[in-house]
Image: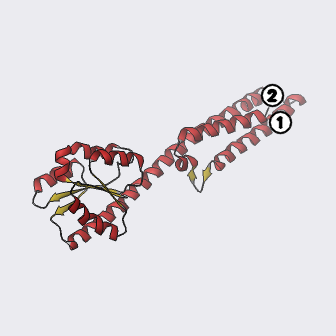
Amino acid sequence: MILLITQNYLLAQNIQIPLEFEGFVVKRLPTAREAHIEIFQNDHVVTIIFEYQQAVAEGLHKYLKIKELDNGKFVPLVALIEKNQMAEQITLFEMGVDDFIFLPFNTIELQMKLRSIQRLISLTQSLKDKEAQIENFKNLNRIIGTLNHYINNALTPLYSTAQLTRPEDPNQARRLKELTEETAVFIGKVLNALRNMTQQRELRVVQEGVYQDVMFDIEQELNRLRQTMH
């Protein structure tokens, strides 16, 4: 979805109709306040187009703050601005605006800008995918750390028992053998738990978006496994 922020009806029509003809879903909003609400509630916004003069009247910072929202940090900001306002364009670019649609525009210029917007959308999606992959690796490291903790806890009593076991004592030797088998089974189940927590190389945390819940599931599963060992 593209958000088009302007109170100029004619300008909105001249922008919205070609965008929709190109296959974009366009939602026109009157002010930055409504845009903030829409971005907060909707993670499918791919671009925001706003009218520069209106933004100055409202407070340009309200538009730039969209980048601070979780759903807005990768959304390109495109300003509708007069072609001769060069100083303002440089200032906007330095403040974080990603692109411009120059006023007045003709059909060819608008078509070229639409292609530029499509590239921005593709870049935005690529950035989101990369961020998801990075977060996925972070979560994987945390989960592996938790599993490593359980494996070490399982090996510690086995190591202590091995150090204290007298081979000539059949009861101690039998207990060491049993504990070794139990530990091996438990570690196998721990590794299997990790395998079950992954789906096509993507952890459930990425799909569900709640890291704490997944870690809680792992803790519960491993505690259950430990109880079945005793």
Q: Residues within 10 Å of mark 2 (few under 14, many from 20)?
A: some
Q: Which quadrant is home to the N terminus?
A: bottom left
Q: Amino acid at mark 1?
A: Glu
Mark 2 or mark 1, whichever is nearer to me: 1
Residue 70: assigned label: none
Q: Is residue 64 left or right of residue 167?
A: left
Q: Residue at x 83, y 27 (%)?
A: 166
Instruction: Report which residue position mark 2 lands on.
Output: 165
Q: Is residue 111 left or right of residue 88?
A: right
Q: Secondary structure at mark 2?
A: loop
Q: Secondary structure at mark 1?
A: helix
In this view, the residue in front, 43 or 162, is 43
Does 228 sit above or below residue 44? above
Q: Amino acid at mark 2?
A: Thr
Answer with mark 2 or mark 1, whichever residue precedes in sequence: 2
Q: Residue at x 55, y 47 (%)?
A: 208
The residue positioned farthest toward the bottom in the image shown: 108
At which x and y percent is residue 139?
52, 43
At which x and y percent is residue 97?
24, 52
The answer to whether any part of residue 213 appears in the image is yes
The quadrant in which residue 105 appears is: bottom left
Instruction: Report which residue position mark 1 lands on.
Output: 178
The quadrant in which residue 226 appears is: top right
Q: Is residue 169 left or right of residue 220?
A: right
The residue positioned farthest toward the right in the image shown: 170
Does 131 sit above or below residue 120? above
Q: Residue at x 34, y 67 (%)?
A: 20
